[in-house]
Image (spheres, rainbow, N blue to C red):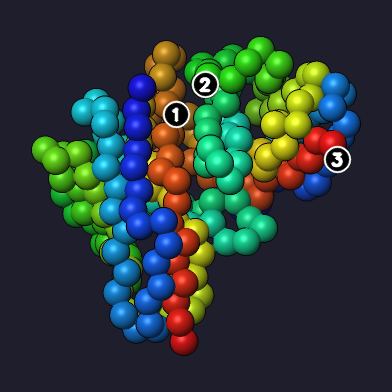
Amino acid sequence: KAGVTQTPRYLIKTRGQQVTLSCSPISGHRSVSWYQQTPGQGLQFLFEYFSETQRNKGNFPGRFSGRQFSNSRSEMNVSTLELGDSALYLCASSSGLMGSPLHFGNGTRLTVT
Amino acid sequence: GENVEQHPSTLSVQEGDSAVIKCTYSDSASNYFPWYKQELGKGPQLIIDIRSNVGEKKDQRIAVTLNKTAKHFSLHITETQPEDSAVYFCAASTLGAGAGSYQLTFGKGTKLSVIP
């Protein structure tokens, strides 16, 4: 079974631009979550999608948004990029049931200059 | 919200020795506690998890213990090997707004180095 696939692996953007990250979950998984990982703040929850609906959201500004398609693939968008948005963005998929394990992809490394 | 503290931040052990990483959580409603291993350039990989109705769980050289009263849980790795070297994260789950929804609150990680 293929794992969680995130594209692209690396991105370099300029402050003020916007960016879209893509995630393909494990086949059969209906829940996709996004996390931001930085050296200072560690792993922080952004949001979770299940059956194309956002079920849960972390404490990030509205510049961070996402969506999920009918095939469970998900995209995350960050608008008006700031230097502090430089991070590893991780996508995780699960069946969506309470306590079902999260399986992470290898992330997209975003650098904002 | 939930807060997870993890100690130590770095840990060096000799190959063959045991390693113990400890975490505490603040929200008594949390009931799912996974542990992840992250190697350089990769995403976190689930290595073991425990639910609040269980006090201990083992999987070969890895074990996790949970003390709900004290709100702490620990990861034990026995007979450590160089390939165990990585960053380990503990996490606790908090119920989200939607049915079945939950988010993980992670500790800050422990960098484990196993010296051959």
User: In the shown orientation, is residue B35 left or right of residue B44?
Assistant: left
Instruction: Respond whether the residues carrying marks 1 and 3 are from the same subunit.
Output: no
Q: Residue at x 46, y 72 (%)?
A: B113
Tell me the mark number nearer the camera, choosing from 1 and 3.
Answer: 3
User: In the shown orientation, is residue A85 left or right of residue A59?
Assistant: right
* Residue type indicated by callout 3: Ile
Q: Residue at x 21, y 54 (%)?
A: B65
Please state which of residues B11 and B60 is positioned toward the viewer in this rendering: B11
Q: Residue at x 53, y 33 (%)?
A: A44
Q: Secondary structure at mark 2?
A: loop
Query: How far apart are the two marked residues, 1 and 3, measured between alpha carbons?
Result: 28 Å
Q: Residue furthest bottom?
A: B116
User: In the shown orientation, is residue A29 left or right of residue B99?
Assistant: right
Query: How far apart are the two marked residues, 2 and 1, measured between alpha carbons?
Result: 8 Å
Q: To which residue does mark 2 refer?
A: A58
Name the image quarter holding the N terminus of chain B.
Answer: top left
Picture quadrant of residue A75: top right
Q: To which residue does mark 1 refer?
A: B103
Q: Which mark is residue B60?
A: none
Query: How far apart are the two marked residues, 2 and 3, measured between alpha carbons?
Result: 24 Å
Question: On what subunit does the disc labeled 3 rest?
Answer: A
Q: Secondary structure at mark 1?
A: strand
